[in-house]
Image (cartoon, coloured by chain):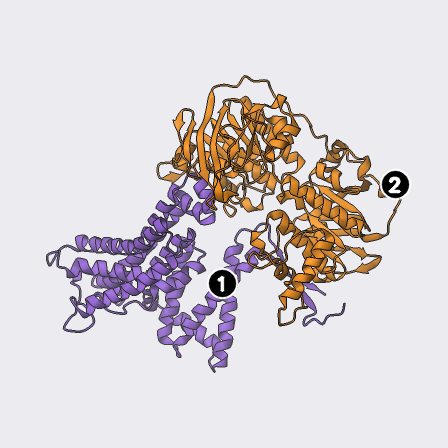
Chain colours: A orange, B purple
Amino acid sequence: MTDTHALDATRAAPSAPLAVGMRDIVKRFPGVLANDAVDFELRRGEVHALLGENGAGKSTLMNVLAGLYRPDAGTIEVDGREVEFQSPRDAIAAGLGMVHQHFTLVPSLTVTENILLGLREPRFRLALGRYEARVGALAEETGLAVDPRVRVWQLSVGEQQRVEILKMLYRGATILVMDEPTAVLAPQETEELFRTLRSMTERGNSVVFISHKLDEVLAIADRITVMRRGKVTAAGVEAAGMTKRELARLMVGREVLESLEKVAREPGPAILELDGVGAISDRGLRALTDVRLQVHSGEILGLAGVAGNGQSELAEVITGLRPCSGHISVNGKEVANRPVIEVIEAGVAHVPEDRTGTGSAPNLSLTDNLIMKSYRTRPIGRGWTIDRVVARHRAEELKEAYEVSAPSVDTEARLLSGGNLQRLILAREISSGPGLMVAVQPTRGLDVGAIETVHRLLLAQRADGTAILLISEDLDEILSIADRVAVIYEGRVSQPIPATQADVAELGLLMTGVTPSGAVPGDDGGPRTSGAAA
Amino acid sequence: MPRRHLLPVRIVAERRLEAPRGLGLLTTLGGIVVALVISGVLIAVIGGDPIGSYAHILRASLGSSGVLSDTLVKATPLIFTGLASSIAFRMRLWNIGTEGQLLMGAWGASAVVLFGLLPAGTSPFITLPLMMLAGFGVGALWAGVAGWLKARLNVNEIITTLMLFWIAQRWIQYWVFGPWSEGGFQMSPRFPREAWLPRLTDFASAVPDLGGLTVHLGFVLALVAAGLIWFLLSRTRKGYEIRLIGDNPRAARYAGIDIGRNIILVMLISGGLAGLAGASEISGVVHRLQDNFSPGYGFTGIIVAFLARFNPIGVVVAGIAFGALILAGREIQPAGIPAMIQGIILFCVIASDVFLRYRVRLEAR
């Protein structure tokens, strides 16, 4: 594949003064050239998307801009003046604020206290009331609706993000760098964020929007800079003239298959059967109500829904991680409320929602992570002992077959990128030869190339006759690979319909709780009895 | 924006993507060297001669077969308790009451002798294994209480194991002041010879060179225990489960591992090893149960475990090193110095971890 023709920024006539000009930025990490002579220009009043796969160097570039890293070479200008930041404090003083992917808020403090944290201003006596009024005024003025007196732990993720933005604005930032801000947001919250960003740029602020999601970039950005492997492949092109396909090519460096081969297949017998399943969430609220569901051999059942409607609990109930009421059977064997090990032995594989928190052991080697489900049985487990030679050999095979890129099978799992870690988890789960696979948000946070791999692997499993329950927030994903589609809303699962007959608008309505009469089984239309759940 | 800086360079720390092989050992050794330098300065400040002191410590602990033997005697309980801490800490189970389990193990071994269950003159081949078994068993049960509470009711094991130590101490005092007291002294009668772990000096009649060497069979048992624990952790299914739970309990649950059962099991093993420390100490060295026979071997074992980074083979090395320090403490004045060196070494070794996780370099401003 020929390398991309770098698109030139000068085509678009500069219509506004430059807010930021970065030239020939070089940043090295041990063994990696993260930024290789990168140029980046941000104009006043624009949303500029920085697009690229994981590890392309986007975050590094912006961390350099925000004063977190010092470049090995290159210059930075802010509002036409050359600057050299020693720390984030210098960057903020120059009007540059960065909102990180992982928030830096103290949950037990109030919004105002969080915003004041680290400032010199309230010297000793904390006259909180005065500052609350100021924060409130700023929130109103900028349209970032949030109560300055409320404690952060009580806020939703979207609201916490608003606090992070407010924090930067309060410090006088006029240039805002948002590092993958939508990764943690539900679809509606994303739209709200976009409105906020728009209104900010209308007032002359500038926004850098780091992302690897093509739809979002096209929806919000005025201009786009694409990075691949530390280099810029498209510098500041106008978003209006771009297509998803073109962006994907610039990002990945090759044509990305938009449509996946999906063999026609008659579904086999029902593998997973749920009947009248209910469960309680960690907070003690009703998470699942009377769930009835069947997944057949050789089919993918897509379960769509906005996060927090009982998806996690449903997956945990099926895989034995959470107690429940009702009946769950796998291949005719009752598994509800059975120990996890019995569920695994019944042939259930689980690609968990939280790859690092549940799906892997960060400080153990790839080998140890790959044998998590197979260490008990031959040939790896021999009586009391583990055959390290066989385990290692097996791990090397899986690493090769699933293209887990790492120096060796002794590498610790925490060093893997998101896509590689997901390939490792899929390698482990698929190689267990499951009858049922429960995959929860399997492509969340992955880049285009990795998403394609995950979809290909799931479809291959389907072709092999595995029953797959795909739980996802991404409607496009569900509609492109699922055979049947159901929607989960407030712990209730709708009657599945064939994906070919599914209508995006109608599914969207179901996801927000607008139910055409009779579509939700078990809902008698009477007042909800969930009580505290409201 | 002008700002004054104290140094013309700044310290830059970058997260390591991967720690090179052998770096762990290197940073540990580096930490020890730094600790010795700091201790040296302190020795100099109080008017001592650092080089001379260190030379003396070496001579007094490793300089001849006699003192080397004494060092190994001191190292024996430390290896056992270091292993006890290591296996529990590997699972992030903070059993800090190994001292209590050590005492209970000593009590269990004594009970075999002092309850008179065995007729006088029973073969040592029966007496000694029974004593070791009782030591392991009672120590295991003592820690098992904390393990059971943790597994079933999620009671903090740091509190329970520590409190159980205080109870164990009073328990020993009750027996040595009361039922087992020898003529009102706070100690039990001397054990009969068949309850003594064989020492090298016991064979002096055949090999005269062994005369006066008090290192006993307990040291060999400690080495065997280290080998077994190493095998358990790195080569068995149980060991894999322990490592997995230690690194990520949620992943372990996801992999179908019963965490509660493993907590109890590991507590039993940990307490048993600490119990063996007590049993081998009274059977191999003290030859009777008495109050305060342990100068805190359990607590020092925690330091040994950290120094060894919870590696069973490392525990043997660290145990011997600390045995040497304790021995030298009898020799050099003021005697507080070795304890101070211990503390500084632990400090520096734990602090040196930063070099494992970060690449640190200096950069000109």
Query: Alpha carbon of mark 2 to alpha carbon of mark 1: how far?
Result: 59 Å
For the N terminus of chain A, give its image quadrant: top right
Amino acid type, label 2: Arg
The dot on residue A303 is none
Q: Is residue B141 above or below residue B1?
A: above
Label 2, on which residue? A11
Q: Residues within 10 Å of mark 1 (few under 14, many from 20)?
A: many
Residue lying at 47% horizontally and 81% vertically, measured from the top left: B46
Amino acid type, label 1: Val
Residue positioned most to the left = B119
Q: Are marks 2 and 1 on the same chain?
A: no
Question: Can you see residue A317?
Answer: yes
The dot on residue B349 is 1
Residue B49 x %, y %: 47, 79
Residue A357 x %, y %: 52, 45
Q: In which quarter of the view is residue B157 placed?
A: bottom left
Q: Is residue B234 above or below residue A478?
A: below
Residue A337 x %, y %: 39, 36
- Left or right of residue B124, residue A239 in this image: right
